């Protein structure tokens, strides 16, 4: 029998996963705190565990508490209702989470349940969500779930973002075995390519092109099997995509994984002596492609470039470096704004020097 994950100390990959979750939640929450049309904010942690690891490091429930408390004054002043649902099939863990979180969640409506994920999720689906509610789901199962059904439901909810943890290495290795076959993954997909492939594959299963799925790969340090896991972020909104990518690029040098794209974990004491060798190749590759598209006048508005950067997995700042270069060369007359607010409120045309 495998050892219970919560009976061990979190490793660096698990801590990074929780940091990404907390940082995005901290960025997500204020959007709806200040949105006059959102009256209630729901947070669902449906595989919550006991709230801490063996060394009392904070798990996802306490990360939720920390974020809520950072914004408690604004939540109060804006008269927002917060609802948090903690669930785990192990009742002892849920009881421990309740003990660990209740002191930090006074005057917050919380529900603590001990059910299978399937039972819990069915209850959530039946209650439905209104347009004045915002929802965030953190789904960290220890095994497989019915991803097609879960994602289809999540994307049918109003104002909903989520983080889903997936054992991508195991899927790559055992895709033809019973239990894994439900995913319909071909054997040819490598472990390294699996996270990106899963996003494309899951998007096709949901039958909705107007959604965003972004993977981030996690390799456990000193792992004997070199296992790669991934978290998949999902949203229907460009602003959510923007904010999540900012978290990823803040946490890694490539915005894609906690190891370099050649396969080795990046540590500060392993950086190359020449600074230019420490720059991920994917950035200049993206910028070269973007530059060529601008030179070919494939983009008309700043919004086009903003969307292209985000959906390619990059930040507006990466695209803005290209625009600044082309302005210095005299191809463009100005560098347009690439922030979400500016591109959505003002679709600014690219102004070429020869126009």
Image (spheres, rainbow, N blue to C red):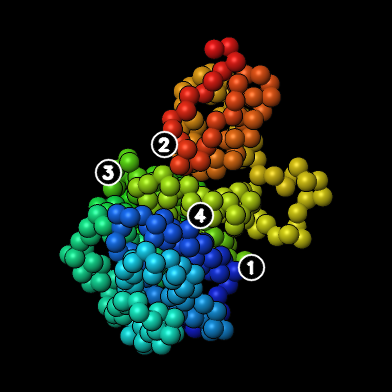
Which image quadrant for residue 174?
A: bottom left
Question: Dots 3 and 2: beta carbons under 8 Å?
Answer: no
The x and y percentages for residue 223 are 59, 67
Tag 4 residue: 216
Camera-near label (3 vs 2) is: 2
Tag 1 residue: 222
Comparing 277 with 212, the one in front is 212
Give the Cα separation between the discs numbered 2 and 4. Answer: 30 Å
Question: Dots 1 and 4: beta carbons under 8 Å?
Answer: no
Camera-near label (1 vs 4) is: 4
Tag 2 residue: 345
Mark toward the start of the polypeptide (1 vs 4): 4
Tag 3 residue: 207
Tag 1's secondary structure?
loop
Assign the C terminus to one quadrant of the image: top right
The x and y percentages for residue 268 are 73, 59
Mark 1 Cα shell of 10 Å, populated few (<14), some (14-19), many (≥20): few
The x and y percentages for residue 10 are 55, 75
Query: Residue at 70% across / 60% down in the picture?
Result: 267
Mark toward the start of the polypeptide (2 vs 1): 1
Question: Dots 2 and 4: beta carbons under 8 Å?
Answer: no
Tag 3's secondary structure?
loop
Mark 4 Cα shell of 10 Å, populated few (<14), some (14-19), many (≥20): many
Mark toward the start of the polypeptide (1 vs 3): 3
Camera-near label (2 vs 4) is: 2
Query: Residue at 17% across / 65% down in the picture?
Result: 126
């Amino acid at each position: 029998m495998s050892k219970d994950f919560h009976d061990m100390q979190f490793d660096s990959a698990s801590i990074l996963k929780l940091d990404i979750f907390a940082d995005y939640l901290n960025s997500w929450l204020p959007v709806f705190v200040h949105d006059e049309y959102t009256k209630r904010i729901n947070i669902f942690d449906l595989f919550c565990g006991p709230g801490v690891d063996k060394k009392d490091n904070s798990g996802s429930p306490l990360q939720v508490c920390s974020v809520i408390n950072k914004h408690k004054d604004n939540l109060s002043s804006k008269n927002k209702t917060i609802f948090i649902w903690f669930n785990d099939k192990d009742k002892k863990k849920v009881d421990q989470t309740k003990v660990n979180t209740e002191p930090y969640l006074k005057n917050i409506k919380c529900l603590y349940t001990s059910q299978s994920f399937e039972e819990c999720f069915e209850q959530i689906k039946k209650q439905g969500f209104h347009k004045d509610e915002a929802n965030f789901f953190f789904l960290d199962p220890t095994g497989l779930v019915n991803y097609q059904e879960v994602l289809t439901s999540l994307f049918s909810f109003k104002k909903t973002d989520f983080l889903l943890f997936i054992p991508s290495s195991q899927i790559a290795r055992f895709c033809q075995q019973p239990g894994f076959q439900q995913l319909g993954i071909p054997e040819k997909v490598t472990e390294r390519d699996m996270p990106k492939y899963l996003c494309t594959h899951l998007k096709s299963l949901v039958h909705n092109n107007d959604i965003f799925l972004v993977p981030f790969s996690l390799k456990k340090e000193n792992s004997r099997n070199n296992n790669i896991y991934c978290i998949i972020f999902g949203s229907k909104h460009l602003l959510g995509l923007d904010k999540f990518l900012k978290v990823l690029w803040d946490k890694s040098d490539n915005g894609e994984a906690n190891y370099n794209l050649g396969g080795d974990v990046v540590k500060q004491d392993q950086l190359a002596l020449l600074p230019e060798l420490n720059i991920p190749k994917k950035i200049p590759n993206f910028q070269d492609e973007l530059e060529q598209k601008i030179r070919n006048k494939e983009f008309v508005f700043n919004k086009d470039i903003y969307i292209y950067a985000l959906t390619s997995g990059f930040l507006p700042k990466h695209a803005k470096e290209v625009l600044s270069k082309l302005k210095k060369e005299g191809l463009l007359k100005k560098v347009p704004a690439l922030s979400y607010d500016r591109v959505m409120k003002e679709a600014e045309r690219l102004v070429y020097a020869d126009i």
